[in-house]
Amino acid sequence: MKKPTWVIEKERAKRVAAAETVWLFGLHAVRDALANPLRQKLRLVVTKNALDRLGDVVAQSGLQPEITDPRIFDKAVPIGTDTVHQGTALEVRPLNWGTLEEVCTRPGAGHRPLVVLLDRVTDPHNVGAILRSAEVFGALAVIAPARHAAPETGALAKTASGALERQPYLRVGNLAEAMERLKAMGYHLIGLDGGADHDIGTAVSGAKDRPIGLVLGAEGPGLRDKTRDTCDLLAKIPFAGEFGSLNVSNAAAVALYAASAP
């Protein structure tokens, strides 16, 4: 009996995902990935100087490093000629953090459970910075759609400066559907919008002791209509002048501080 097309496509997607690899680069990102027992590590390419700076973490990882000349490093690994790699690159499998329910029902880090949802934030530097802030303020996860969002890449990992190894970054098939699942877990979803009537402090206070999901859109277009409609409340970050705006990663940091404050 012939398998349905959707079954064949799903099986093909699983095979592609299983074969996917990512090249991480930069001393901080590579060191933290080598030290992460959850990270499947495949190949380490380093210069002699970088190997000395990585210290014992290479030996502890069980990988046999490939030492190369700094002058030909860019040709030894497929990371681009303009990458600031600091003489180190590591090929890995993407991390598997588990399901949305498994990650987002864990206890919060000293405060109510808190997650960040990103709607079409495609710049890996912004997402990397958001992962760093999410780790600092104890968020359980940063959640983004599998498509039209920054994937797990070397540039994202370098900006995250190690946070990618510790801060769950969940990619979901449909963001609005994931938001509904979070609501079913008791989350109060606050969408960040500069034109909202409520400020972020008031919105957080109004959620009382419920878990909070902070929803941020891409700079320019902001939240999509469906994402906006699925939020429980829209809130703004107040600004001193007649007009003000923040980079999405800065807005995430301010909102995370407000949501995690006692």
Image: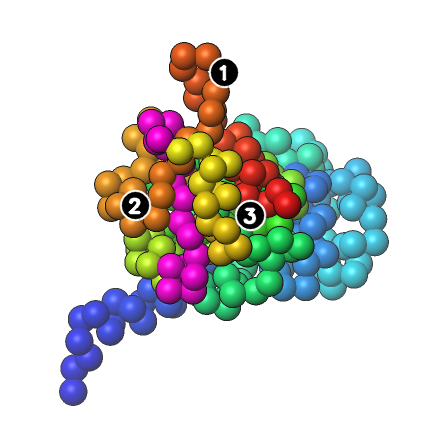
Viewer-proximal residue among 26 and 189: 189
SS under mark 3: strand
The answer to whether the residue labelled 1 contacts the one labelled 2, judged by CB atoms less than 8 Å apart, is no
The range drawn in magenta is 182-197
Label whose residue precedes the other's in the sequence (3 or 1)? 3
Give the residue pinned by disc 3: 23
Q: Would residue 82 appear left or right of 145 to someone viewing this image?
A: right
Q: Quadrant of the C terminus?
A: top right
Which amino acid is tagged 3? Trp
Which amino acid is tagged 2? Thr
Give the residue pinned by disc 2: 227
Give the residue pinned by disc 1: 240
Q: Is residue 29 visible?
A: no
The answer to whether the residue labelled 3 contacts the one labelled 1, judged by CB atoms less than 8 Å apart, is no
Q: Residue at x 24, y 41 (%)?
A: 225
Viewer-proximal residue among 259 and 168: 259
Viewer-proximal residue among 181 and 69: 181
Label whose residue precedes the other's in the sequence (1 or 2)? 2
- The nearer-to-camera label among 3 and 2 is 2
190 inside magenta stretch: yes
The disc label shown at residue 136, or none: none
- Extreme residue in the top direction: 242
SS under mark 2: helix
